[in-house]
Amino acid sequence: MAYLTTDDTIAAIASPTGNGVRGIVRISGPSVSQIVTETFLFDDPPEIENIKRATRFTGNIRLAENLLPATLLFWPDQRSYTRQPSAELHTFGSTPLLEMALKQLCDSGARLAEPGEFTLRAFLSGRMDLTQAEAVLAVIDAESEKKLSVALNQLSGGLAGPLAETKQTLMNVLAELEAGLDFVEEDIEFIASDQIVSALREGLNQVQVIERQIQQRGSDSQEFKVVLSGLPNAGKSSLFNALLESEQAIVTDLAGTTTDFVTATTEFEGIAIQLIDTAGLESVTQCDGEDADDKVPDSRIMQTAQQKRLTEIDNAQLILLCVGPDSKSHNWAAKQMEALQRNDQIFLLVLTKSDLPVGHDLDQHHTSTQQLQNQITDLTGARRKLITVSSHSGDNLDRLKFEISATAVAASTSENAVVGSTVLRTRESLRLAAGSISSALEAAEGDFGQEIVAAEIRQALDALGQIVGTVYNDDILDLVFGRFCIGK
């Protein structure tokens, strides 16, 4: 992850895509005071370096040739969301105006924020742990009161609190054990054996309670049904094979080679998935006066293939709209998204063939892609539902698998107190933590030696650290924060 640095100043539009009554541009970093002074004309100019608490100001944003009325919310110290100097500019919700204001901030020294970078800085500064950061996204994406309640509970520490208590219990035992090992020749007992056993039993019980909550999600024995849909030669079969990591569907440069659906069962993140590759939506010779959307394939085989395709889509729990780099495919996707949203069907937009050259009109392609992004955000409220992949290079395939798994977990009907993405990320770590604590308990009860007990506790702490984020790597952070939209 290239944006782990926190010593520069970032800016982004933080309000939803599209026009609205009000819009917000957010900025955070060490140069906020300087940048705000250059870009904001205060009605009552303050000595900004002397401001010690969150303050609201009125005034105007200096644009290239005009002044834009706005309200400035300024946090001068670590009491902001990111624990850095921060500011928000609230003004008219016109996208062009917000983009002009953002440009002024960048011209004054800020850089455009990456997806989830504000929340990433909150995590890196210790404002929240990784489970709470995941809950922020779950709050944004919540589609029901139940999901919102689960996300808010996790954001307020519903998972972080019990995990912190367990970690503290284990750390206290480990500290006493290591002190005793340092003075083993002095025959000094720093902690009694029954205290070790009692503490380990308490820790194991806490982890097992959380582990049971985690295992309830996505544990249904039935496969989650995922259908790949798209125009002929949109890369569906190549993506199908890439997700399975095997050659099960026929792949050629000729359009329309799939005349029946191909199905296979696999696992993503421990979730059983049934993948179905359908025939491409055929467009054939159009009769005079016939609308383009009403074309019918001219062979009985293709008619049957299209009927099977529609049946599989109707029965799908998730639809992957596979979209090639051409404008025809983009136009088709725009219509499909609206139809699926009307039918309350869940979908992900997958832009395939990212490794291929776009063509002559690169600007038009970027504009079309941005329009699709804006449309999917307006329809679903979730920017992460658009993913660009390459079946050839493997780019973003892991991200797509994770999104499919997260959708499957979110569709689970079982009551649960943990956000779906946290379920997927932490399942293995919780299993390892529970196993290590159980081994430590067995060693303590069997008097196998305090060195063995201490070693098992260290492994348990490492596993718990991966859950809350005290132990992490760039891949984990990219997985969590790459799912955010820009400005969050």
Image: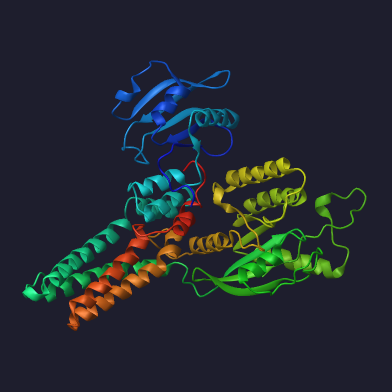
Identify the image's colour scheme: rainbow, by chain, secondary structure or one colour.
rainbow
In front of the other: 342 or 29: 29
- Left or right for 8, reference 298: left
- Left or right for 307, reference 66: right
Query: How many numbered dots are placed on residues in this image?
Result: 0
Please identify the residue farthest to the right as the structure is shown: 288
Which residue is pictured at 37% across the width and 52% down the height?
132
Please identify the residue farthest to the top as the structure is shown: 44
Q: Position of residue 200 (x, y in %)?
A: 21, 72
Q: Is residue 264 above or below residue 227?
A: below
In front of the other: 183 or 145: 183
Q: Is residue 285 above or below residue 30?
A: below
- Left or right for 362, reference 193: right
Which residue is pictured at 43% across the width and 32% down the height?
88
Q: Position of residue 98 (x, y in %)?
A: 55, 30
Q: Quadrant of residue 242?
A: bottom right
Q: Is residue 438 above or below residue 240?
A: below
- Left or right for 436, reference 237: left
Q: Position of residue 37 (x, y in %)?
A: 42, 23
Whether residue 13 appears in this view of the structure is no
Which residue is pictured at 33% across the width and 20% down the height?
47
Q: Position of residue 134 (x, y in %)?
A: 42, 54
Whether residue 135 appears in this view of the structure is yes
Q: Quadrant of residue 425?
A: bottom left
